Image (cartoon, helix red, strand yellow):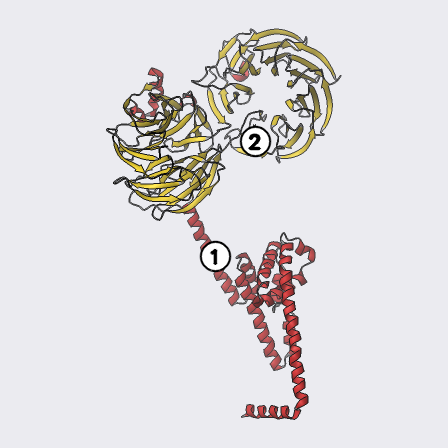
Amino acid sequence: MSGDGEKMAAKSCFDCVKSIESVYTGGCVATSKDEQRLYTTCNEDIFVLDMASGEKVAELKGDTETVTTFAVKPDGTHLVAASRSMQISVWDLATFKTVRSFKAHEAPVIAMDIDASSTLVATGSADSTVKVWDIDRGYCTHNFKGHGGLVTSVKFHPSKEKLCLVTAGDDGTIRVWNLGTRKCEAVLESHVSVVRSIDFTSDDDGAHMVTAGRDSVVNIWSWKRRLLIRTIPVYETVEAAGLLATNTQTGLDLDGNCARIIYTGGEKGAIRLWDMDTGKEIFEQKKELNAKHAFVDVQYLPQSQHLVGITNDQNLLFYKVTKRLERVRQIVGYNEEIIDMAYVGHDQAHLAVATNTEQLRVYNTKDLNCELAYGHSDIILCVSAHSKGSIVATGSKDNTVLIWLVNMSAPPNQRVLCVATAVGHAKAVGAVCLAQGAGCPFMITGSEDRTVKMWDLSPLSSLFDSPQRAAALVSESGPVKLRSTYTFQAHEKDINSICVAPNDAVFATGSQDKTAKIWDVASGKALGTLQGHRRGVWNVAFSPVDRVIATTSGDRTMKLWSLSDFGCLKTFEGHTNSVLCVEFLTKGTQLMTTGSDGLVKLWNIKDAECVLTLDKHESKIWTLAKQHTEVHVATGGADSVIHIWKDTTQEHIDRLHMEEAKLLEQQQALDNFLSVKDYRNAINLALSLNQPHRLLTIFQEVMMATEHRHLASANDGADDSAQSADAAIMGSAAVDQVIGSLAPDQLERLLGYVRNWNTNGKFARIAQATLYCILTQYTSDAILSLPSAKDLISAVQPYSERHFTRLDNLLTDSFIIDYTLHAMDSVNPAGMEALSLDNDDSECE
């Protein structure tokens, strides 16, 4: 950023450098065996994500029907997916292309598992059947019938001696199938509801089996005897259960001698650990404040020793397998609408985002990892960040405002902490703004109850400079309860926006009552009213340098107002729908706006001209956030996508300068080639520069020079040189040779030039000569292989016919001249001879 005394260059170019979009919309999730890739369901497609960064690596396009389940081969070479179309598709994970597709069942496939050899895949369907398929060859090897309802879970037994498959249904029965004999070996009946999970112990070659379901129990079975050993009541609907590795592998030592641990996850939204040998609960995870999610699946990653909880609100929560099961990471699968956001952190590398959820989401814009902060009990509506980046305020539908301290260098569970609460509004808080100055900190809030409150933040003043003290402060006394300094009714309708001036002396409010008002911070008295909009005011923003304020409205306009007399200075028109958000850029000389039309516009204030329009969102853009350096801006809206834009004005200018310099060099090189009559290089360079006029001039000069030489040779009687000149179609053998050795793309470009030249009778001769030169040196197959050959030929043909018709008419007309001359000779030949002698005498004189 330029210094205070330097003039900042106006911005004119922004490029989208990163997008934060939905990667999981509910359904199946799988990981590769090496834990490098994560596979998620996103509507009818499957996304391949990098496990470390969470970024999308590839997208496996579905068949327009929702994906019901999928599984990844243990060797990581293929992915097998099923959708509601009853089709099973096999994807090559090296090329991300479909290898084969086939119809599997008469109803959608619900459960799927692949054996350890990566050869067979078992599918359980809603048609009550279980089928086993050879993946590489694509045919069915087994078809098992016996379940009375939906098949909800399938699992291959890990034993290599006898290949067995275990299946479970919604009737609570578990069946054991022998793939060698193709018969059902056992029917295990203990569950009374849907069985959701099947797993086997790994330390004893699968001697024990663990099953869990929605009947709130976990059953442990002896595999050899096919008998129930123990039932563990868990008192919650279980959606996922499995076995952790032994203590020596995990390093987990909970009570000194526990070797086999079962994990469960379900409707409570907490992972619980159980001693398989005793049936006692070892640990229950403490649910976070106001967290409403439930687990729909829990997966164990043995290499990294993580448990991944997949929630019903489409988040993936990573827990380290330790005594406390601390959350170390999360991937947000789906954001719903992006309502508001602000850049946070000392380096402004994170985005605090409010969506249609009660959690505050803090994204790392570098690697797209996200921190979830729980505290509100209803949807967050507004976000405001302090200029130092460590303090964030959020207003919610739960009528409260929470103050958060963001310290991304802290341990995972202390990165976003709630340090204060502001309770007092009677309805949802829709607008909040933190004072940005260095004086006594305060906050202004606005609510649907039409009131404005000022809150004293002096109890938190130490945290603005020392965020490291936050954890100690919260652990000692909990979040600070803030008190309001004053309260008054500000508008007749809902308050949409609040902004505090850079000097912290005044603040502005924008409302659905079509007005914006200016207030004194110290006393809360009204200083002026900005009237002129025909619809509600959505956003207000102060200029960082001038005494002006910008407002946006549902009347599709943005207005600039003077703070001296509260009059309208300028009106900006260009959006085709409501203008929702505005920010000042470039030291107050430019404005950036977003609207319900899905457009981002950049304006010059001086001439009220729109200099740039960015069109990447598919729906209304609710929010716009900028960094202090203005290098990046972020936009988010109803399409659930956040786009991060980088100011590339200087790069664009540098690129243009480089292109101009390169063009000048090439132009000089072209002039040099022409001066030395190096037509080969001149023609190639003219084609590469896409300069048809220069190329036409070259052809004209060559042909005219050849004609002049031909006339001079004819006058001297040197017919041989004239005949050699006629041998070249374009007047020069070098030119003919260049045209005959063009690359396909150059030949296509030259034919395009010929098409354009041929439309003008003045250049028709050059066009026809060039076309003839091409047709004599290239085969018809070579010409027709060009992508636009048919269009070029169809465009050249009618004009060529017109030119030949014109020449035929000229030739016919020339016969009249011959007839006239012969007639004159026959009438007065002597007179003509005398006239000829007189002309000779005059020439001699």
363 left or right, relative to 450? right
- Residue 825, by quadrant, is bottom right
Label annotation for residue 190:
none
> Height in image: 41 above or below 203?
below
> Residue at the right extreme?
181
Of residue 658 and residue 607, the one placed in the foreground of this image is 607
User: Label 2: how many residues lie within 10 Å, few (<14), some (14-19) or many (20+)?
Assistant: many
> Height in image: 122 above or below 580?
above
Q: What's the residue type where badge 2 is placed?
A: Phe
Between the residue at mark 1 and the residue at mark 2, the CA separation in whole angstroms equals 43 Å
Badge 2 is on which residue? 47
- Residue 241, by quadrant, is top right
Residue 759: x and y, percent?
58, 63
User: Label 1: how many residues lie within 10 Å, few (<14), some (14-19) or many (20+)?
Assistant: few
Of residue 694 and residue 223, the one placed in the foreground of this image is 694
Badge 1 is on which residue? 663
Q: What's the residue type where badge 1 is placed?
A: Leu
Pick whichever of labels 1 and 2 is earlier in the sequence: 2
Of residue 514 and residue 393, the one placed in the foreground of this image is 514
Secondary structure, mark 2, is: strand
> Height in image: 523 above or below 690?
above
Residue 550: x and y, percent?
34, 39
> Residue at the left extreme?
523
Question: Which residue occupies 60% across, 64% down?
Answer: 767
Secondary structure, mark 1, is: helix
